[in-house]
Structures are given as C-alpha cells and as structure tokens.
Amino acid sequence: MHGLINRSIQCFLRDTYGEALWRDVLGRAHLPPEGFEAMLHYPDPLTDAMIDAAAARLGKPRAALLEDLGAYLVTREPLRRLMRFGGTDYGEFLLSLEELQGRGLMALPDLDLPEIRLTAATAGRFLLQVRAKVAGWGPVLAGLLRAMADDYGALAIIELQQDAGGHAQLQVSLHETQFYQGRQFDLASPVVAQ
C-alpha cells in the first residue's frame, strides 16, 4: 500500500481519537514505531492490520471506521479543494468521480486508487461501481460522498453494498442540490492588495 494512504489513516486515528489510541494501534498491529512515511510503500497486510487493530480497539465495525476515514479526508483542506474542483454543485461533482483515478495517477503514478464507473440511472439517481485491488474503498468513498454532500449543501442519500473483495456499489439519491448553505469555496484565493 502506498505510504500516503497509510499516513492518512495514521493522521485520521491520531487527530480523531488521540495519541494514546494511535500508540495502542501501533503495538497491537506491530507497525513501525515511527509510523508511516507518505512516499514509501508498505505491504498490504500491514494496512489491514492497522485498520483491524483500530476497529477492535474502538469496538467499531471495520466498514464504519473506514466510512469515518472518508469523511475525515474531506476535512483536510488540500483534498477538499481538489474535490471541489470537480464541479460547481454536488451533481457535477458526482459526474467528475470517474476522473479521480486518472487525476491521482497524474499526481502520483504509483498511487493505486480504485476505478470508479458512474451511471446516471434516472433524474437525481446515480450508481457508482467501485473496483479496487483491495477491499475497503467502498466505505471510504461512502464517507467521502456524505461529507462532500454536506460541503456542497446538498441533500443526498448514499447507500453502500460491497462484496468480500475490492468491489462495491454506491447508490446516490440526490434530492436537492441546494438544500442548505454549503461551506464557502472560492476557486482562487483572494488577492491581497499591498
């Protein structure tokens, strides 16, 4: 697994649950004591061990923890900004998700993001097929989609179905694109006059 992904999980656990929990997960999962370096690669079982140890320690289902991770990622301003470039409203954002894997590869050619296929079933209903080499991307994307709906101020219901492998299906029912005031977003930072 790419170190950027492992580092993101590490930051999520530390920021959300504190240093004591992170230290406990380090010990339970036999992780490197210094944590993860974002630009290195690590064996996939190490990532699974980290997620399983955190879920066990928190008494949370693995899928729920991964969904929380997806929501957390949107709170990180650099990723939020990248996601918001996907469209002016939540519907446009959903339509841009098929490009996510390609954009990730342009930035980091060795980053293994899932393949996403989007079908607009009927007005306001979208079906996302998620294919990945490792399981867990479905819940992460479900959390990310929920958090982005909040960010845009949209009213959307996201339903997740996944199999034991790396495949998942997300059904998004978009009821209202401007249900409430979303978070402020400007494409460019305002220029400060000197």
Image (cartoon, grey):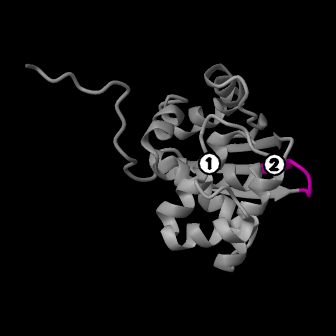
The reply to whether residue 19 is in sight is yes
Q: Which residues are magenta?
A: 163-170
| Residue beneath the point at 49% across and 34% down | 84
Residue type of the residue flagged with mark 1: Phe
Name the outermost residue toward the bottom.
59
Is 17 on the left-hand or right-hand side of 115?
left
Task: Tell me residue 6's x, y (percent).
Answer: 66, 48
Circle 2: element type:
helix
Compared with 58, 10 (above or below) is above
Disc 1: which residue: 36
Task: Tell me residue 31's x, y (percent).
Answer: 69, 59
Packing grade of label 1 (10 A; few <14, some 14-19, many >=20) is: many
Residue type of the residue flagged with mark 2: Asp
Quadrant in the picture for the C terminus:
top left
Disc 2: which residue: 44
Q: Are marks 1 and 2 in contact (CB under 8 Å)?
A: no
Gap in angstroms between the C-alphas marked 1 and 2: 13 Å
